Amino acid sequence: MPKHKPTPVEDLVIPPQDTKICGTICMCQMTAVLSSVALVYLTVAIYMPSLRAFKSGITETPVMCTTTRAVNKDNCDWGSCGEWCLSKTSGACIQIYVNLRNNGSSVLLANCTNSANKTCYGIDQENAKKSRCIADECRNLTGTFNCTQGMCINITDAFECVFKDTDPPLKCSGRRGKINCIDIDGLQNCNRGTCEKIRTPYNCDRRCVDIPTRNKNTILLSGDRVYLSQCQRAMVMGTEQEVWNESDDNILMASCYTIENTSLGVQATDCINGTLLDKSVLSDLTNFTYLSYLSVTNTRMLDEKRKVAPPEMDLLISNESRLLINLEGCVNTLRDECKEFLREYGKDGTDHNARARFPCFFAVDNTDVVVARFNLDATYREFIVASLVPSILFIVSCLTLILCQKTVEVGDDAKMRFKKKGARKASEKDNGLGDAGGGDSAMAL
């Protein structure tokens, strides 16, 4: 078969450079548009929040917060966490209030043996079975129930409540049962669908018994967890200061944020309410409620100067501050971060579980607001990246479009080509000669 000669480039229907030029122009136009849109969006999402963070005066050293109450509001002027910052909190939200205090002590327990861990689980609010009275699911309630606006959770297996007075009974069974109990609220003592609201004062002891205290001289509480051990001495971490020794023949007790068993010993951070108990106070077994009671009522301090594991009241900065997830009170990830945040930080003890305790940040001149997330270094990096990347893309794409305007021409065949210097000069020369000839002809005429 005869070989076909390749078609010269200049004879192609669409020259290769025409395609490349069109692609370059389209790409630069798209980049310029997207980068300009990004700059507008990032002004609200990154630039303005970053500038507020730089000017906020919030210290980067965290202190400690303890949730005191979580309030569900129908109409909010502020909320602890919102899922989208471009649409600020409106309608219903959750407002979390906290106690703000300075950090407690970090303690090292040395040479510990015969250790024991006990976790006292309460009610898992997320996964617990709920009875909706409006759906007539409260007609057979029997036991102790924690109800919120007609939604009841059985806490009988987790808590034993002792009380004296109750409100008049409500009958949740029968034809009008769901109407009677549609807004049932508070702690209820129920028997076959007839519920009585338990009046304060009452005492609900967590059914966490058989905590072994025999041959234990150190007890640390951390939320719902109890750590017990037989230790030789206790020191302030980072120093050689000894604050307790087993020769004192008593029991060291404190409430700490974290408890970790390391090669150096048991390290506990943010310890408060440090007390010394007589061995006669505890028997071989005890319960969680009694230990919690001892940790806040015992007046025999671990340190006479109240510097090591001091009482919580000595560290208090503010009684009731508003908690925000960050300075904006919102996130833009759309990953349901707020749902997890409110579940974790909204534990205010109303469900008889331990209150949330966590590091937080605040400004010295404004203790009314605290934030759970604050990192100036990360904010600065985000600000630099969000400023440089779209700005550089916008400038480069615009300069490329200007360059294309100066160097690209459309020929008589409607194809785009780069201008050639030689051809341009020749064209100008021909145009000049043509003009001159035309002038001579006019003169001759």
Image (cartoon, rainbow, N blue to C red):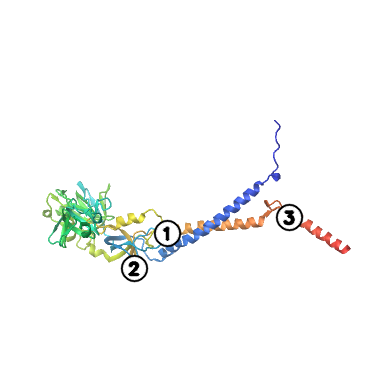
Q: Residues within 10 Å of mark 2 (few under 14, many from 20)?
A: few
Callout 3, which amino acid? Arg
Lower sequence index among marks 2 and 3: 2
Task: Look at the numbered discs 2 and 3 and tell me whether their residues touch, using CB distance below 8 Å.
Answer: no
Instruction: Name the residue carrying label 1.
Output: 379
Task: Please name whichever residue, 172 or 213, is drawn nearer the observer in this view of the structure.
Answer: 172
Callout 2, which amino acid? Asn
Q: Is residue 101 visible?
A: no
Q: Residue at 65%, 46% (x, y): give it.
A: 16
Tell me residue 350's x, y (percent): 23, 59
Tell me residue 13's x, y (percent): 68, 45
Task: Look at the numbered discs 2 and 1 and tell me whether their residues touch, using CB distance below 8 Å.
Answer: no
Q: Is residue 35 visible?
A: yes
Lower sequence index among marks 2 and 1: 2
Which mark, residue 366?
2
**Looking at the rendering, which quadrant does residue 445 occupy?**
bottom right
Q: Which residue ends up furthest to the bottom in the rendered image?
A: 365
Name the element at disc 3: helix
Q: Nearer the viewer, mark 2 or mark 3?
A: 3
Instruction: Name the residue carrying label 3.
Output: 424
